[in-house]
Image (spheres, helix red, strand yellow):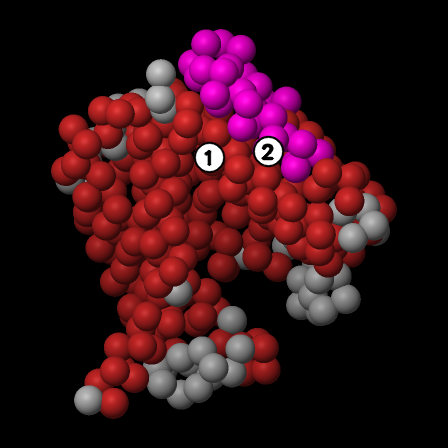
């Protein structure tokens, strides 16, 4: 029994099951923003879309473990490959199967949703093969993948246009946070040519602040165009205050900056959640 449990746990660890479930939550947030209280009417699309997201993230995390297997021997020796519980070849095969299942499930949705999934898989492969170590292009890659999660939530229920602002807000905040994380990890990123290494810390700080401030400005649009009510505005202003603090504090404390940018994203999601109630 213990051996069987260990066998299951290695796959749960490989997939980063918590990340997979959080991705499904993100998809549902996109659905909620797109159709609000009508979301239960789309139970079939949500079920299929959740499977698409779950297997996509599992495939991406598995591919990440395969690509980073040598680095993980020192940085994360407990992971399935460096610990010897899974072979690199098997992990690569699992990643391919997960991506294939994600794509196959997307065929049961509309063509727009399938296209989003195909582009997301291509971006993930590009990230692991090239842009991860390229600095800013890798940051942009991650930001796009974050945005596409919410766009998929919109496409599966036919409400894509209502998710544009949420996707853009999430992508911009993620871009800023990723750059701040690179500033924080500048001394330990020996194998990556990150933006801070290219332009220096001070310029990187300024670049990181730009997408965060743009996200703050963009966050007001759903209220100004009448999409969401005063309840949305009240909460999103709190999120904006946190984002502004993150943009300022990251100049002297990158760790605090990226942490508060994450908090701002969480509060902004609450604002969009309330915005679904009209």
Counting the numbered discs, the total is 2
Magenta span has 216? no
Q: Earlier in the sequence, mark 2 or mark 1?
A: 2
Give how far across and how far down residue 85 sits, in percent.
36, 85
Residue 62 placement: quadrant: bottom left
Instruction: Locate the C terminus by quadrant.
Output: top left
Disc 2 residue crowd, few under 14, some 14–19, many 20+, Cα 10 Å:
many
Q: Where is residue 157 in the image (x, y as percent from the top left)?
A: 24, 28
Q: According to the image, label 2 marks what residue?
A: 239
| Magenta segment boundaries in residue numbering | 217-244
What residue is shown with label 1?
270
Percent across and percent down for residue 223 are 51, 15
Which residue does the image show at 36% across and 36% down from the upper left?
29
| Picture layout, residue 245 above or below residue 234 | below
Q: Main secondary structure of the magenta part?
A: helix
The residue at 48%/52% (across/down) is: 126
Distance from label 2 to label 1 (Cα)? 9 Å
């Amino acid at each position: 029994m213990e051996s069987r449990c260990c066998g299951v746990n290695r796959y749960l660890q490989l997939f980063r099951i918590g990340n997979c479930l959080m991705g499904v939550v993100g998809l549902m947030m996109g659905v909620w923003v797109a159709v609000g209280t009508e979301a239960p009417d789309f139970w079939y699309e949500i079920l299929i879309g959740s499977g698409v997201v779950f297997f996509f993230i599992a495939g991406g995390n598995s591919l990440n473990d395969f690509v980073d297997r040598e680095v993980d021997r020192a940085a994360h020796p407990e992971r399935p490959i460096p610990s010897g519980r899974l072979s690199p070849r098997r992990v690569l095969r699992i990643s391919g199967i997960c991506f294939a299942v994600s794509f196959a499930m997307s065929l049961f949705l509309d063509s727009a949703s399938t296209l989003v999934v195909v582009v997301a898989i291509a971006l993930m492969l590009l990230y692991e093969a090239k842009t991860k170590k390229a600095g800013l292009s890798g940051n942009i890659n991650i930001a796009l993948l974050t945005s596409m999660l919410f766009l998929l939530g919109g496409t599966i229920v036919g409400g894509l246009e209502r998710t544009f602002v949420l996707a853009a807000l999430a992508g911009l905040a993620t871009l800023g946070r990723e750059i701040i994380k690179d500033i924080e990890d500048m001394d330990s990123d020996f194998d990556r040519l990150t933006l801070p290494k290219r332009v220096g810390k001070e310029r990187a700080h300024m670049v990181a602040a730009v997408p965060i401030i743009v996200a703050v400005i963009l966050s007001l649009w759903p209220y100004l165009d009448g999409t969401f009510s005063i309840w949305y505005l009240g909460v999103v202003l709190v999120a904006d205050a946190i984002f502004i603090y993150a943009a300022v504090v990251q100049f002297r404390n990158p760790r605090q900056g990226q942490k508060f940018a994450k908090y701002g994203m969480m509060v902004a999601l609450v604002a969009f959640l309330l915005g679904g109630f009209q």
